[in-house]
Image (spheres, grey):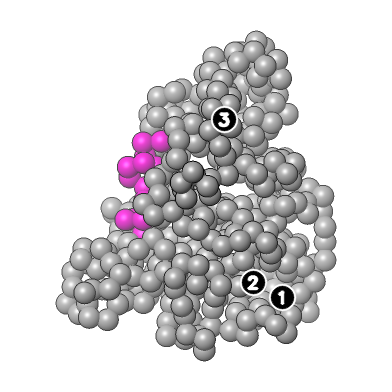
Amino acid sequence: MSEHHHHHDHDHSELSETELRVRALETILTEKGYVEPAALDAIIQAYETRIGPHNGARVVAKAWSDPAFKKALLEDGSKAIGTLGHVSRVGDHLVVVENTPQRHNMVVCTLCSCYPWEMLGLPPVWYKAAPYRSRAVKDPRGVLADFGVAVPKDIEIRVWDSTAETRFLVLPMRPEGTDGWSEERLAGLVTRDSMIGTGFPGSPS
Amino acid sequence: MNGVHDMGGMDGFGKVEAEPNEPVFHAEWEARVLAMVRAMGAAGAFNIDTSRFYRETIPPHVYLSSSYYKKWFLGLEEMLIEKGYLTREDVAAGHAVHPAKALKHGRLERDDVERTMVRGKFARPAPAPAKFGIGDRVRAKNIHPATHTRLPRYVRGHVGVVELNHGCHVFPDSAAMELGENPQWLYTVVFEGRDLWGADGDPTLKVSIDAFEPYLDPA
């Protein structure tokens, strides 16, 4: 059994049983006139193609490049992002939290899986799973070590538990050695995990 | 409810294991489940808090051994049965045996999908002035409702400081039980890591939750 399969929490027999039950449910909902399969297809297509961390990366790159935008973003994330025509689908309750040399931010949802979908897409499995949800608020440095990431011991770690409909996006620090870079080029350094706080942006070299 | 979903601070779940190049969905059925939840929510069959509550009421051993979208599926099916949109006979037959129940907002059509991709608005007009100001010390109440709540166990009884005021929002504890929106002030409250986890806790750690006013007492 491969490493990948070993860590999955379902096996093939459960998968097929689940698959049958899911198909049956969609059949019933369709027959009752509750769902239109083409609408379901469109929802899936949006998450598979349009909604992903590239949205958040553009916002971060703009904040790194434009001090007035950064100020507005930290004051009211939803409002500032709403001014960008190309990233307009954010809801009302986005809070952007800034990493500084004194503070590293990390986002979790201990109760379920709340995550800024519009900025980052659907959350990865680890974000929704018990190890991250249980440990992020108690041992964030241990969690960071699982990602191969270390934050200096004298820096404050601030963990934001998303317990309401507010959503949090981490604004990572701009990597050194990127002076004069365009927003587009900067966006290429912004990783999904750096916007959750479990990683850093890529290095320019 | 004090369920296994309330995981903050629990030990024993092991390391966080990220999957390199993880796909958006691991199987087609996962995508169908997500889409059915979104479509039925948009049609008004349930609100987001009710859907969370149904996932929380999955038996603990099933919750802990089911994949994420399996939990979504189990919660969706049970919720639709209990709300009268489905019957157990429909599910057993794999076909609609009983007639449909009217949906509050009507079926989500293909052309309306775009509109549902924007997050819902949860802010509401304030029914009363805010009790707490920025910088106030507050104690998370030691409460243990058996129904849905968004006050995690690990902060209950502890003192924190109000850092942000998000305005009045739909109160999940009421909305989940279909008792109305009952808007309440919502604050970000910050706790010292050592207050939560004791003297052995990380001295550089601060943890915040977003707390509705009914969760808090002055401290």
Residues marked 2 and 1, same chain: no
Q: Quadrant of the C terminus of chain A?
A: bottom left
Residue labelled with disc 2: A138
Numbered disc in front, either 3 or 1: 3
Q: Are labels 3 and 1 on one chain?
A: no
Q: Nearer the viewer, mark 2 or mark 1?
A: 2
* Chain holding disc 2: A
Which residue carries the number 3 mark?
Answer: A13
Amino acid at the residue labelled 1: Leu
Residue B136 horizontal side relative to residue A56, left or right: right
Write down the chain letter for disc 3.
Answer: A
| Residue pointed to by mark 1 | B196
Asked whether residue A3 appears in the rendered view, the answer is: yes
Q: CA distance from mark 2 to mark 3?
A: 36 Å
Query: Residue at coordinates 56% horizontally, 72% vertically from top-left?
Result: A142
Give the crowd class for mark 1: few <14, some 14-19, many >=20 residues within 10 Å. many
Mark 2 touching mark 1, by CB under 8 A?
Answer: yes
In x, y percent, where is residue B1? Answer: 78, 51
Could you tell me the amino acid type at mark 2?
Lys
Residue B94 counted in the magenta span: no
Residue B67, position in %: x, y?
A: 58, 43
- Residues A23 and B66: in front is B66
In the rendered structure, the residue with mark 1 lies on which chain? B
Write down the region rendered in magenta.
A44-56
Label 3's element? helix
> Which amino acid does the dot numbered 3 rest on?
Ser
Dot 1 falls on a residue whose secondary structure is helix
